[in-house]
Each structure stands twice: as C-alpha cells, then as structure tokens.
Amino acid sequence: MRQALLNARDLAQHAEAWGYQRFWLAEHHNMPGIASAATAVVMAHVAAATKSIRVGSGGIMLPNHAPLVIAEQFGTLAELYPHRIDLGVGRAPGTDMPTSKALRRRLSTSVDEFPQDINELMSYFEEQQGAAVRAIPGAGCDVEVWLLGSSLYGAQLAAALGSRTRTMRHVHCSLRFSRPCSLCAAVNVAACLSPLQISTKPWISRAESWWKNF
C-alpha cells in the first residue's frame, strides 16, 4: 500500500510536468489494490508534493459522510493549498453493503436526500456570520465543487443547484455511457440552468477511467 501511495505522488508530479491541470483521487473502501479510502489524506499527500496542479476527489461519496465533516476536511486542504482544491461528490456508496454498515451509513437513507446533502455541504463553504454551525476551516474557502454522475440525473441536478458537473465515463461501461450520452448531459445542463447560479456560466467536464490489472 505504501508503494501505491508513493506511485500516486510520483504520477501527480509527472502529470504536472506534462501540463495536466487536475489530478483527482477516488473514494473506495474495502477494495484490495485501491489505497484511497481516506481520500482527503491522500490528496494532502499529493498536493504537498506538487506546486500548481489542482488536486481533487473523484469523488467523495457523500452518503458515507456528514456534509459538515467533508466541508471541514476540504476547507483545511484549501487553507494549506489555496486555489488548488477540487471537491467532486457523488451519491454511490463506493463499497459493499457490510462495509457500508461499518461506515455507519444510514442504510434507510433515500437517494432523494442527496440534493439536500449537497445544499448543506455547499452552504458550509459560504461566509455565514452568526450561523449556529459553521465549518472552521471551510467557511469562505475557495473550493470548487463538482457533481459526479454517470447519468443525466447528475447533470440535471448540477444545473438546478448551480454547481459544476463532471460526467463520469468508465471504460467498462462504454456502451451505456458513450460520447453521445456526454453530449446529452451537456444539453441537459444548458436546458436546466436557472437564473440564480453560483457560476456565471456552466462548466462541464468529461472524464474516463482506465483500469488495468498488473
């Protein structure tokens, strides 16, 4: 595991030298061969070894966490590495059912609560003087929030909430989540935009994950 973490740091340094702008790490639990269960910790490890590349989560599975804890973690990262931290969030568990129970997820939680969790999370990054609960660090920090999704739901939700959206495409799902689907997601963002947005224009990014057994 130590060597995997060192390799991730080395890869990020090379990516920065090659001109890449972002280096993201996933959240997975109880999966041999994947050492990013403590995503924010690994991000700090990578950010400390690089100078300019943005380091982010691809992504934090919000049902596993209290939004306040994530805001505090990423607020701390943003204070240590200003203007370089991305927070990608998703709604999948990122693990199996027994591990979900060990993470103390409320298994009765409905996916319908995900928009409320996103709103709560993003509110902690705002300056809210006098609020009963504040993220410290976190409030007022420069953290880019991205919404991960492998369907049109994520694109529509991102447009409704005004956050940036990243449409994930995995190589083993190439027939389902193809290039036309990414275009549909972009069209849905444009169609669902409301007048009140965090950004002045929508941001859409398409990513591909490649898995290889060595």
Image (cartoon, grey):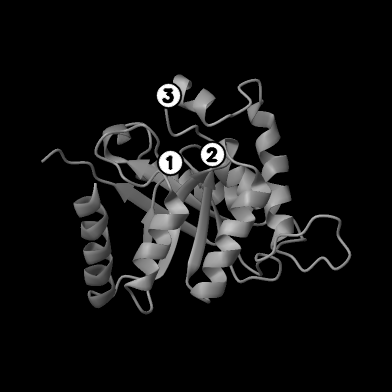
Q: Residue at x 24, y 46 (%)?
A: 1
Confirm or deny contact between disc 2 and disc 1 (CB under 8 A). Answer: yes
Name the amino acid type tagged 3: Asp
According to the picture, the residue beneath numbered tag 3 turns out to be: 96
> In the figure, is residue 87 to the left or right of 161?
left
In the picture shown, does residue 152 fall above or below 15? above
According to the picture, the residue beneath numbered tag 1 turns out to be: 181
Disc nearer the start of the sequence (2/1): 2
Name the amino acid type tagged 2: Leu
> In the figure, is residue 192 to the left or right of 187?
right
Q: Residues within 10 Å of mark 1 (few under 14, many from 20)?
A: some
Name the amino acid type tagged 1: Cys
Q: Position of residue 61 (x, y in %)?
A: 52, 41
> In the figure, is residue 84 to the left or right of 176?
right
Residue extending farthest to the right is 130
* Of the two numbered discs 2 and 3 in the rendering, the one whose residue sits closer to the viewer: 3
Q: Secondary structure at mark 1?
A: helix
Disc nearer the start of the sequence (2/3): 3
Nearest the viewer among 47 and 194 is 47
Q: Residue at x 36, y 63 (%)?
A: 45
